[in-house]
């Protein structure tokens, strides 16, 4: 990963926060006030450095984010979910979450989980799953299917030479819809903690 100067990184973070809140870039005139630069030449120089580093593109004084603008830091250490381990603050890499989770943007949708039938797979009520639209899936994949006119999320399985929808919670029954209508395969999930 190419590192940018720490001052530029601070300015970039302020622009990322602004963009996350407003979903648009501020005007050239407003950028100075947002990032703390006094002159328009300083703002222009900053934007050109960010363009050269492939964070943004500039066309006719309009600014647009590029994929790298959305990349987030990934610590080189891992966090222990068991016993604590020594923290190491080494060099950071970056990860564009959208590029990591979304292979086919035109065929990807998000849907929120309702109920606890997939809790054994780590999918809890309120989680958002990232789904790639597909009408077929392999055994073992988690799918979104239509059963009795409603969406359901289950693991695709085979039972006596027929397809079934297997929950990941023993309190829920296996579904055996005829015909089976798959609308997508789950490729990721996320949840927000408040």
Image (cartoon, rainbow, N blue to C red):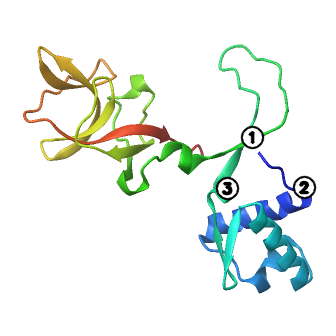
Secondary structure of the residue carrying numbered label 3: helix
Is residue 80 positioned above or below 35 on the image?
above
Whichever of labels 2 and 1 marks the residue nearer the N terminus, that label is 2
Callout 2: helix, strand or loop? helix
Apparent side of residue 103 relative to residue 186 in the rendered image (left or right) = right
Quarter that holds the N terminus = top right
Q: Is residue 67 left or right of residue 120?
A: right
Distance in Å between CA atoms under marks 3 and 1: 12 Å
Q: Which residue is mark 3?
A: 68
On the image, the x and y values in percent for residue 27 come to 71, 83
Eyeballing the image, is 83 above or below 56? above
Q: Can you tell which of label 3 and label 2 is closer to the viewer?
A: 3
CB atoms of marks 2 and 1 within 8 Å: no
Which residue appears farthest toward the front when viewing the image?
52
Q: CA distance from mark 3 to mark 2?
A: 17 Å
Disc number at residue 6?
A: 2
Q: Give the residue displayed 16% in from the left and 25% down from the top.
A: 163
Q: Position of residue 106 (x, y in %)?
A: 38, 57
Earlier in the chain: of badge 3 and badge 2, it is 2
Per the image, the residue denoted by label 1 is 93
Q: Earlier in the sequence, mark 3 or mark 1?
A: 3
C-alpha span from label 2 to label 1? 15 Å
- Residue sitting at x 89%, y 83%: 41
**Which residue is at the front of the view, 14 or 120?**
14
**Residue 46 placed where, x, y %?**
84, 71
The spot of residue 171 in percent (x, y) is 28, 20
Q: Is residue 173 left or right of residue 60?
A: left
* Local secondary structure at mark 1: strand
Say which of 111 and 169 sits in front.
Answer: 111
């Amino acid at each position: 990963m190419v590192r940018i100067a720490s001052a530029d990184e601070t300015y970039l973070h302020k622009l990322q926060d602004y963009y996350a809140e407003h979903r648009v870039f501020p005007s050239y005139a407003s950028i100075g006030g947002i990032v703390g630069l006094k002159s328009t030449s300083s703002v222009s120089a900053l934007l050109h450095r960010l363009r050269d580093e492939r964070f943004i593109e500039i066309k006719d004084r309009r600014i647009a984010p590029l994929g790298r603008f959305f990349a987030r830091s990934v610590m080189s250490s891992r966090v222990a979910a068991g016993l604590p381990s020594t923290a190491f603050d080494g060099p950071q890499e970056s990860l564009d979450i959208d590029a990591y989770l979304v292979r086919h943007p035109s065929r990807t949708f998000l849907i929120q989980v309702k109920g606890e039938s997939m809790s054994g797979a780590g999918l809890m009520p309120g989680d958002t799953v990232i789904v790639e639209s597909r009408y077929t899936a392999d055994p073992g994949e988690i799918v979104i299917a239509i059963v009795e006119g409603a969406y359901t999320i289950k693991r695709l399985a085979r039972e006596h030479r027929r397809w079934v929808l297997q929950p990941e919670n023993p309190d829920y029954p296996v579904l055996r819809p005829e015909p089976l209508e798959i609308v997508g395969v789950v490729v990721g999930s996320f949840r927000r903690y408040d």
